[in-house]
Structures are given as structure tokens and as C-alpha cells.
Amino acid sequence: MTLEEKIAMAQTIRSRDRFGPVSPEELAALPGTETEIHIPVEGGRTVHVYEERPDGLPAKAALVLNFHGGGFIKGRTDRDRRYCCTIMERLNALVWDVDYCVAPEAPFPAAVEETYGIIAYAFDHAEKLGVDPAKIILAGHSAGGNLVAAACLKNAESQPVFEPTQSLHTQVAGCYYEYNGRLHKGNIRTRLFAGYSRFCLGETEEGITTKLICRLDIDNTSKQVCRSVPAFRPTKIRRVASYPDYRAVQFAVMVDDPGSYGGKCLLNVKLDACEGNNYAYAVGTPSGNAKYPCIKMSESPVEYEQTNDDDTYIETNRVQVSATNNLFSLPFANSYRFGVSEERIIAIATVVDELSATRFGAFPLYVFTDRGVWSLESGTGEVLYSNILPVNHDQIINPNTCTALETVFYITSRGVHNLRGRSSQLISRQIERYTGELTEYLKTAQICFQFKYGDLIVYNPEYPYAYVYSLASGFWSSRDMTGRILNNGQIIMRGAIALLGDETMSCSVDCRIVTRPLKFGTTDFKRLETAVVRIMSQDCFVHVIAEGSNDCRTWITLRDVWCRVGDMDARFRRTSTSFKFLRFKLHLTANERLSMTGVDVEWYPRFTKRLR
């Protein structure tokens, strides 16, 4: 049939109107005001729309988009206007009656594209139209309802593809890093979901085990999961067999039966992928007088190539970034891979704090692997990271990193490095006298920065000493770190690092506390006039000792006092001898947390004799 013949047939159908026209009097009595407008949509089309506006339209009103019926070949009629005016009056809403193009003059999918274009225009220009985008209503009858459903499906297909790991799989990572409200996960290990079982119908039978098997194709690697259902013999699957991952390609049902069906496959179907919804499915076909479609089990065994279950896959070189402030949402576009598939991500770090909940800084994010260092350059707009660039090929041997003064410090097989921008430098050459020993030390070392002194501390709990690097001078030194408190609230103890937490003491503990040497401004000789030591604790006795020294090596006891902490502070009076340095020692037995919150001191410099 030619196009002219199709148009002639359509005109004949359009001329038939079994309901009859709407009288002019009825049209004149319709409420509101009707306006003809033309809306441009994608593809260069212009859609004819009739707007029905009530007399008292409120601010942020609802908008109803109505799509008339007519078998896709009939246009808008006066009855559609009467229907739209009724909706407008009852809802006090703005109504658009869309006169979309019809066939055969505009064949499929022209009407669907115009419908989708009008809906998109309404949402994009809701503020200009004075309507609430949350109150946009889609309506249609007959062919119009079909177009609305098609437009919704088209919208779903245009959405970003879901990351497959957002289904029911279990995922853990080798390293985590939170930056700007997003969780970064590296070196990812995923255990696949075992599959559903409720859609399979059958009968209870002891001694039977049914296995629901699903095979997935992930990066050209076959994976298989199995859900076992004991004491159950399957007969059919109602409506649809499915798996929550679009990479699933095959579904099978096997029965482990010592009888005639022992280890045989009763069903083997191919699954179709729906990437937009991260879904794979197989739909049954109606048969006989069945109300719903179903997939029946075969009466005789069918062929199935059975393999060993392998429900885990590892992506050691992938970083997955979550959505902003939602660590459960993992957009597919926020997935990044580094180097070859065998490369293993060890750590993630950056050199700046977050700017806001949604905005990244200009500094890159660094990814440390066992084969080198990579940088992720920040993108613009919806692009999270624009480029993946290699920085160097150093072999990272320790996941601990430290950030300070716009520099990242990290440990490799060659030593300690600093990284700024895309330039890295080895800074530990001064302590490479015994390379093998240093490498063993660094493998399990911790690294931190003391902002108060400008020192980088590399400390291994298995050793009694630490390496300290001064950023100001560029020199290394070794120190006994026992008793030093780090920035994160940890105190270094010989052979271990203990965290100062809120634990409850089960028994009394003998405590000895020594302050650092206090020079009080200068190293001139000074005499103690008055000292008040404040201690926060419950009722207990404490022995407080004041000591003096001129070289910080030999200490002489100046005063000591016993006091009851619950009643008073520890107080000292004048000492007879002058020293350059002073310190305080506390000895007490405590059964709960305590802290020395401050020391107030008055002293006389030896030469000026003026009270300070």
C-alpha cells in the first residue's frame, strides 16, 4: 500500500464520528481560557498544544499534560477540550492538551518523540511556566496512554547505566578514602548474589535438592552462582526468571536426586539484559488456559554444561567513587581503572581538605599501586575526574601515607618519598646506610606529621626508635619515641602503639606522669615562687614533685607535696635555689581516667628579680 493510499484510508476513518460533535453553546460555556501555543522539541519539530488556564491559577500550580486517543491516526477533537476543561476546573490546575502528530503522515516513532519532547520541555521550563515540577501530571487515554507509557520507558532508557555492583552483591575494598563527601574504594573484591528462589514453584519432597544456577559474563570471564533449595522438586517458574545484574546470560534449574533425575538439568534458558535497570530476565509464554505466563520444567533432562561455582571476582586495579553524601549509590560513570588488570591498588590520598560537600579542589587525587603512582585530575561540571595520568613507577610497599603542607608522603621499596603535583622526590637517602634493614623497617612502619614541630615521623612499633625528618632543615634523626603522643591521640609505647580511649579500668593502676622540661621563655636562671597543678579526676591522693635542672639531664627535687585531688589543687611555695629548667612529676594510684589540665607558675628571674 502506498503512502497516498494509507492517507486516504486514514481520512475515511477520521471522518467517522460515532459520538457526534460538541455544540457551540456547550463550547462557549466551558470555563477558563484556551490558548494555542507551539512548543519546539528536539529533531526540529514543533508541537501544537492547547493550553487551558483557569481564572485564578495559584502560584506553583499543578500542570496536567493530556494526550488524546484516536488509534494514532486521529487528532484532537472538541470532546478532548471538554475533558481538559473539566480536569482544569476540578484540580484548579494548568492543562496542556497536546495535539501530537499522527500516522500515516508522521509514522512511528514520531509521536513518541514529540510526547517525550513535550514532557521534557515541561520539566525543564517549570519555573518559567509558574508550575511546580513535583506536580506535573501525565495523562492519556487509549493511544495517548500508550504514548505516555512509551515516553516513560524512553526516559528510563536515557538514564545513566547502573553500576552492576549496586545490586545485591557483597563488595569489600582493600582501601577506602573519603574526600568531599564521596567514598573512594580501591582494590575491590565482589561476591556475587546467590540468586532468587521465590519465583520457582514446585512440591515439597524429602531427599531432593534443587539448584537454581545463574551464569554471568563479567569482562569476558564466566562466573556461576548457585542457590540451593532443599526438600523441593520444581515444576514451573511463574511469569519471569530474573537476576539483579544485566551481565547474567543464562539461567538453569538442576535437581540433585538419587533417582531418575539425579544431577540432571530440567531447565536452561537464555537471559535478556536490561542495562538501564541493571536486570537480566527471561519471560514465559502463556499456554492453554493459564492466566499468567510461566516457564515449565522439562519432563526429560536438557543439556547444560555444568562448571564449578565461582561467585567471586576481584578488580585490584579499579577505584569506585560513590555519589555525594551517599556511599550506597555507585554511579557507573564514577568507575576508574589504573594500569593493567594485575595492578593492585594499595592506598588513596590527596593533598588538600575538602572544599565543600559537592566541590572538589584543584589538587589531584593520588592512587598508589604496587607498580606506581597515578593522579586523577579533577574535572568540571558532571565530569568527576577528567584524566588518569601516571606520576612514576615506584613500587609501593606500605599503605600508610601522610599529608601535610600540600605534600603527600609515602613509602616505596626505595624509601620515603614526598609528592607534590606530579613531581615526586626520594627524601630518605640520608638513612640508607643499610638498605635491606631500612626496607624491612618501612614495610610495617607508620607515618605521621607533627604540625607543632614541623617533623615527619616514621615509626615502626616493632622497633624502639623512630626516624624523624625535619621539613625546615631537610635532615633526618633517630629518636626514642616511647611516651610521645601523636596528632591522632595515640601514645607510643615500647613495642606497641596504644590508643587513649574511653575504656573502663577493671582495677587500680599505678600512674607516673612527667611533664616536658619547662624553660618559661628563656634559659636564664629562675627561682620558683608559686606553682599550682590542676588535675581532673575523682577523689584520690597524688604525690606531686617539682624538679629543677640546668642541662635537662640531672634533675634535683625542689619541692614535693601530697594532696587530695577531689578537694584541692596541688600547690607549691618558694624554692631556695635557681635553675634554668623546671619539670613536674606526678605519682598516684587511679581506677578511672584522669588528666593534668594545666600548670600555673610564678617565678623570679635570677638577675631582674621581678615576679613573672
Image (tube, rainbow, N blue to C red):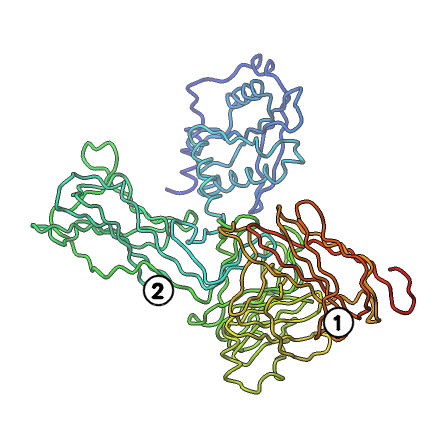
Residue under label 1: 549
What is the three-letter code of the residue carrying label 2?
Asn
In the image, which is nearer the foreground, mark 1 or mark 2? Answer: 1
The C terminus sits in image quarter:
bottom right
Name the side, left or right, on which 164 lies relative to 176: left
Which element is circle 2 on?
A: loop
Percent x, y for residue 34? 62, 24
- 286 w.r.t. 184: above or below: above
Name the side, left or right, on which 521 lies relative to 485: right
- 112 w.r.t. 52: above or below: below
Which element is circle 1 on?
A: strand
Percent x, y for residue 23? 54, 14
C-alpha distance separating marks 1 and 2: 74 Å
At 74% across and 56% down in the image, what residue appears?
A: 599
Q: Any mark on residue 220, and which?
A: 2
Q: Earlier in the sequence, mark 1 or mark 2?
A: 2
Question: 593 or 213, which is in the foreground?
Answer: 593
Q: Residues within 10 Å of mark 1 (few under 14, many from 20)?
A: some
What is the three-letter code of the residue carrying label 1?
Ser
- 108 w.r.t. 531: above or below: above
At 61% across and 54% down in the image, what residue appears?
A: 180
The N terminus sits in image quarter:
top left
